[in-house]
Amino acid sequence: MMDTKSIETLEFPKVLATLAEYTSFSAGEDAALDVAPTTDLREAQRWQTQTAEAIMLLSGDSEVSIGGAKDVRRSAENAQRGFTLPITEFIAIKDTLISSRTLKRNLLKKRDRIPQLAEISDLIEEVPGLINDINQKIDERDEVADNATPALSRLRQQLRTAHDRIQDRLRGLINSSASQYMQDPIITMRGGRYVIPLRAEFKGRIKGVVHDQSSSGATLFIEPLNTVELNNSYRSLQIEEQKEIERILAELSRQVAVNGEELIRIVERMAELDLIFARARYGMATDAVRPIFNEWRDLKPPHPGSTVWIRAARHPLLDPASVIPTDFLVADDLFTVLITGPNTGGKTVSLKNLGLMILMAQSGLHVPANEARLTVFDNVFADIGDEQSIEQSLSTFSAHITNIIRILRQVDERSLVVLDELGSGTDPTEGAAIAQAIINFLRDQGATSFIATHYPELKLYASQTAGATNASMMFDVETLSPTYELAIGIPGKSNALAIARRLGLDESILDEAMGLVGIGDREAEKLIDSIFDLREKISAEEAATRLARSRAEKERDQLRMEAVALEYERRKILEEAREQAEAELENVRNEIRRARKKLKHAQSLTAVKKVSKRVSEMEDGVQQPLEDLTLVDIPDEPKRRRNKRLQVGDTVGIANLNTTGVITNIQGKEAEIAAGRMTMRVRLDQLEFKSRSEPEPEQRQSSYTPTVTDISMELDIRGERVESGLQRLDTYLDAAAISDLPWARIIHGKGTGRLRQAVRKALGKHHGVNSWEDGKQGEGDEGVTIVRFKR
């Protein structure tokens, strides 16, 4: 677990509070506020993948949402303790179950695109029985339904009858001469009993029980004596009704208790998905990018092998419209960065920004930057800001040192350390010495460190120490304001003299000050100035290069899109041509079927040969154009050998399965293949002709048997009337017998059984049928009849 104090110092809880605003229900909000950065590389990568999948999903799919889910874990726990739940909690449970089921099914439909999210959704359990029970017991008005139980139905019928009797009797009184004593001709209720408003001065004119009076005392609400028994009966029925409702709710609560653990797990899975969607929405709102995690490199000690490389990091807690991006581009051979610069120059904000980038990345959040490459740190330590403790009576220096001592006891080579104004608050000479000693200790431990300081002695240390580098916050002398840009590799320079000159300090004073500074320091300042000028020039060239590259990538993407569009159009034209050819082929096939039907009734061998010859000519004439069309080369489309027209009985190879099988049926563009004990349906363009069983030459010479190659081994007559179904069956049996099929499946369905009985009676009379039997389990059971033909 990472250092809690440092996480709070870096203000990571504020980031989580912003993240929680993007959640959809309370359990997801709690999960967002409880997020803790992981220290495991694989888990960090998995979380980032989940966020990336969610962004892709939300960018193009508005159907996916948490829906009406509620955090019903407390309700489930109360039910398990034996409490009776109120109706509102049953409604929440039902809505949660329906929402979780809908979300699960939507995500599983897209498993290929979002495997990580689908894996989580697959863990969501479904409790359909509880949904049905709640729907049966509670109606759309969110009340216990009249038909929840027979007893409740009877009680409510009696209540309606009792209510009507009371109303009739009171209306009769209102419509009688006694109405002159009433304040208003209305029926109202007091204390659960129906009453009428009587003017106070006529008290006693209508015998009854006074239940209430108006605030002015002018009206008495009385229950006439002739309705007392009716009201008593009505009230008794209400009490019985309430008892029955409580019994129903108690029974429903026990069912919730039985499914309590499932409900709790469902809410937890929904909260996990809600958190992932919140990370995605937050990333989309901040224009964030997915960080790339690098493995720790095996480098020469003390370098730990860490990577911190973030371009244009934007502080997540600052206004996106005004925040200035910061580059943390640390070279591979560096792991200690010493930042110098003036106060109010942005050092503290930059250090917090860096710490938040690391914590966000290791929490599954995309980071608000243009690009990020990082290692996964085991801990992040920070000492930033004024840590003075009034309660402990510690000075600013003491407070900082106390916190740093705590950090130094825990730090190791897998730690990131962020320290602000190290060594400040005490004597400059001693402060600089302590700062350098602490930096040496962190370096020896192999900690990756970013340290802000204003001690000039440390600039020289960074330039002479392996693995360390200077960095500085930029300052605009013209406007006398910081630019909040971080320049790694360049030491900060003193702007005091330049600022004084800009503000109008006397030149003689400035000249004397320059002389006191010393020649070496002046030369160093000039060198730093030249470095800054060179850096600005390089930055401008890099910006121009990035712009040119961006334009080139856009042009490349546009060309790719145009190529895809052309390919799509080509495929579309080809498919239309295929469909047209198929339609023409189907017309000829119909003519072939009619010709074959004549074969059945042909009276002479000469006629048979004549019709058969005509059939062969039509088959040969119509197949070639379609085959020529399908031979057009289409990228990524499997091809098959088309030197033979496939027919039932052919041995074929199955593309992508490295196996062979025998065609048992052909329907349209698909064939049924028997491969060993397995039967499958495969597109014709996925098959490659291997061989065909031909009759022996002497058999071909001695006899001619017409065959039907496009007859299906299955007839579906479900939904047909008996008469029309038997007509189709008779035609099919004749064709099947002529085609010499070994067997066939007749699908008639179960229904009332009339069609099944008629089919089997017809099978018993047909001359070509040898036997029939029920379909086996998995074949349709009694809804299917398997027919075996005489050979």
Image (spheres, helix red, strand yellow):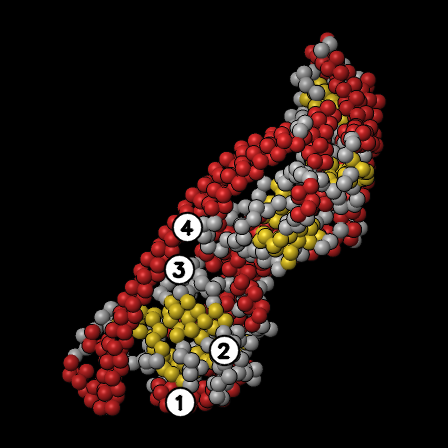
Residue where numbered disc 3 is placed = 319
Q: Is 148 placed above or below 414 here?
A: above
Residue 422 sits in quarter: bottom left
Q: Quadrant of the C terminus?
A: top right
Residue where numbered disc 2 is placed = 416
Q: In the image, what residue occupies the spot 51% across and 63% down?
A: 365
Q: Position of residue 551 (x, y in %)?
A: 31, 60
Name the residue type under label 1: Thr
Q: Contact, CB < 8 Å: mark 2 with mark 1?
A: no
Of the two numbered discs 3 and 4 on the same chain, state the one appearing first in sequence.
Answer: 3
Near-viewer residue (157 or 117): 117
As drawn, the label of residue 465 is 1
Residue 596 sits in quarter: top right
Of the two numbered discs 2 and 4 on the same chain, state the one appearing first in sequence.
Answer: 2
Residue where numbered disc 4 is placed = 567
In the current view of this chain or complex, which residue is farthest to the left? 508
Q: In the image, what residue occupies the spot 21% across and 86% down?
A: 514
Q: Position of residue 364 (x, y in %)?
A: 53, 64
Residue 616 in the figure: left or right of residue 417? right
Distance of label 1 from label 3 (alpha carbons): 38 Å
